[in-house]
Image (spheres, rainbow, N blue to C red):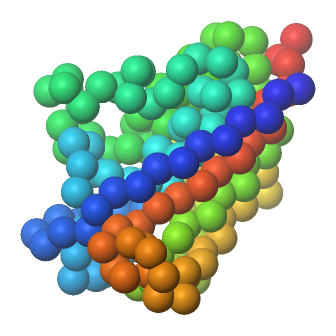
């Protein structure tokens, strides 16, 4: 078995959709990025790639590549899972935390878990998503951006 950790952060900005775990969340700002800037999906992808020693999301899907401009990050996550499986691994579980002062994410977490589980080809019981604030501290606490951490357990597919 192998354990992986992923982290991602994007700046909040006007005139962008806020997408987390493939769920569009009503909010006055969205995350700035080359793709849809879904920090949750990105952190999970990085945790999977790290556990499989396959690099990181920026290597697999560079922000200099026009093919990935505005892309749905769940598509990137599915491609990541395929690479992990081709390397001989299967997902045991994923545990992720979104760090955001606002908006409140609790009502959206069940849909995020379902989307992420579907993208990863696992049961929803294998995907945990939590949300926390930083009590007004730092860039997330000040509403400048949103971050996500993820850890995963990979098991040998053999």
Taking 140 as reference, is 151 left or right?
right
Residue at position x 21%, y 42% from top?
34
How many numbered circles does the render carry?
0
Q: Quadrant of residue 144?
A: bottom left
Residue in front for this viewpoint, 25 or 2: 2
Q: Quadrant of residue 32?
A: bottom left
Q: Residue furthest front?
A: 138
Q: Position of residue 125 (x, y in %)?
A: 79, 57
Q: Quadrant of residue 23?
A: bottom left
Taking 70 as reference, is 7 left or right?
right
In the rendered image, the vertical position of residue 76 relative to residue 114, given as above or below: above
Q: Position of residue 13 (x, y in %)?
A: 18, 69
Q: Position of residue 12 (x, y in %)?
A: 26, 68
Taking 50 as reference, is 143 left or right?
left
Q: Position of residue 1 (x, y in %)?
A: 89, 26
Is residue 98 at all visible to an observer of this figure? yes
Is residue 18 at all visible to an observer of this figure? no
Residue at position x 60%, y 27% from top?
49
Residue at position x 69%, y 21% from top?
52
In the rendered image, the vertical position of residue 130 relative to residue 101, given as above or below: above
């Amino acid at each position: 078995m192998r354990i992986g950790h992923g982290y991602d952060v994007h700046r909040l900005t006007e005139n962008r959709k806020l997408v987390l775990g493939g769920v569009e969340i009503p909010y006055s700002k969205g995350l700035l990025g080359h793709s849809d800037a879904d920090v949750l999906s990105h952190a999970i992808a990085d945790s999977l790639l790290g556990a499989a020693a396959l690099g990181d999301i920026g290597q697999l899907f560079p922000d200099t590549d026009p093919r990935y401009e505005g892309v749905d990050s769940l598509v990137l996550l599915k491609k990541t899972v395929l690479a992990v499986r081709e390397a001989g691994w299967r997902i045991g579980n994923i545990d992720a935390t979104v760090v955001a002062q606002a908006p409140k994410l609790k009502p959206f977490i069940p849909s995020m878990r379902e989307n992420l589980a579907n993208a990863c080809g696992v049961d929803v019981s294998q995907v945990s998503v939590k949300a926390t604030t930083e009590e007004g501290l730092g860039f997330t606490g000040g509403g400048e951006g949103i971050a996500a951490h993820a850890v995963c357990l990979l098991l040998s597919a053999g």
